[in-house]
Image (cartoon, grey):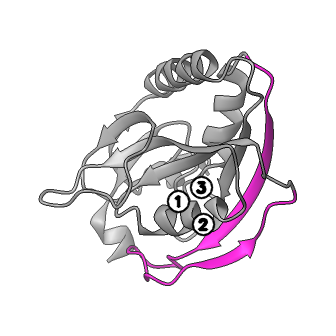
């Protein structure tokens, strides 16, 4: 089974060790910045659940987590531009320091919408921790994350929570998906 899953991968761009180093660095930065603040991490489902779990283990200060599910892709490869809240937070965020954990930032439009939505709930602060930022020539994301794990090429990447049509999330690395898989 694992062999078949890997057949759709053109190349590996981040190994398990690369990922571990990125997450540990981000966890240390957040721990320094949020000492005595008890941040609430908001994992954007589904893609960010793997990253968020690892990031929480790398953070050394008291914190909590909640989950939001938004949809803007469907089964496609590009954002539809329409954002739907599929699952809202269970935690009240008024007065809390919120860190949105995002798997990958490309256009930033969905995240920008989410920040606006959460800002209306009067948190003490909102920060964004993006595992990966996609480098798209000639385009800058709509938002600038406060914590950036790494930059990735403008390719369709999967693994470590990132998917194509709900597959490949369980890969322990990040790889470029072969175009024939999604064409």
Q: Quick check: can you spot residue 158?
A: no
In the depicted structure, whether residue 172 falls above or below residue 90? above
Dot 2 and dot 3 residues touching (CB under 8 Å): no
Under circle 2, the secondary element is loop
Bounds of the magenta segment: 61-90
Name the residue beneath numbered marker 2: 166
Q: Report crowding for label 2: few under 14, some 14 to 19, many 20 or more residues within 10 A (C-alpha).
A: few
Name the residue beneath numbered marker 3: 47
Magenta highlight on residue 104: no
Q: Report crowding for label 1: few under 14, some 14 to 19, many 20 or more residues within 10 A (C-alpha).
A: many
User: Viewer-nearest of labels 2 and 3?
Assistant: 3
Q: Quick check: can you spot residue 10?
A: yes
CA gap, disc 2 and disc 1:
5 Å
Dot 2 and dot 1 residues touching (CB under 8 Å): yes
* Image coords of residue 56 (percent x, y): 71, 30
Name the residue beneath numbered marker 1: 163
Residue at 37%, 73% in the rendered image: 182
Q: Which residue is at the front of the view, 98 or 56?
A: 98
Disc assigned to residue 2: none
Residue at 52%, 53% in the rendered image: 162
Under circle 3, the secondary element is loop
Magenta highlight on residue 75: yes
CA gap, disc 3 and disc 1:
7 Å
CA gap, disc 2 and disc 3:
9 Å
Q: Quadrant of residue 65?
A: top right
Q: Which residue is at the front of the view, 180 or 17?
A: 17
Under circle 1, the secondary element is loop
Q: Residue placed farthest to the left in the image?
A: 138
């Amino acid at each position: 089974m694992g062999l078949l899953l890997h057949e759709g991968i053109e190349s590996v761009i981040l190994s398990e060790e690369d990922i571990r180093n990125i997450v540990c660095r981000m966890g240390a930065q957040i721990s320094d910045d949020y000492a005595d603040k008890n941040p609430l991490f908001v994992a954007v489902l589904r893609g960010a659940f793997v990253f968020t779990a690892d990031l929480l283990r790398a953070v050394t200060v008291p914190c909590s987590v909640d989950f939001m599910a938004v949809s803007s892709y469907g089964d496609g490869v590009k954002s539809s531009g329409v954002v739907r809240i599929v699952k809202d937070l269970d935690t009240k965020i008024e007065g809390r320091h919120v860190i949105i954990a995002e798997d990958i930032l490309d256009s930033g439009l969905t995240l920008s919408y989410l920040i606006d939505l959460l800002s209306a709930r009067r948190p003490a602060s909102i920060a964004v921790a993006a595992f990966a930022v996609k480098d798209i020539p000639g385009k800058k994301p709509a938002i600038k994350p406060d914590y950036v794990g790494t930059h990735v090429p403008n390719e369709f990447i999967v693994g470590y929570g990132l998917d194509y049509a709900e597959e490949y999330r369980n890969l322990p690395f990040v790889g470029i998906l072969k175009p024939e898989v999604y064409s």
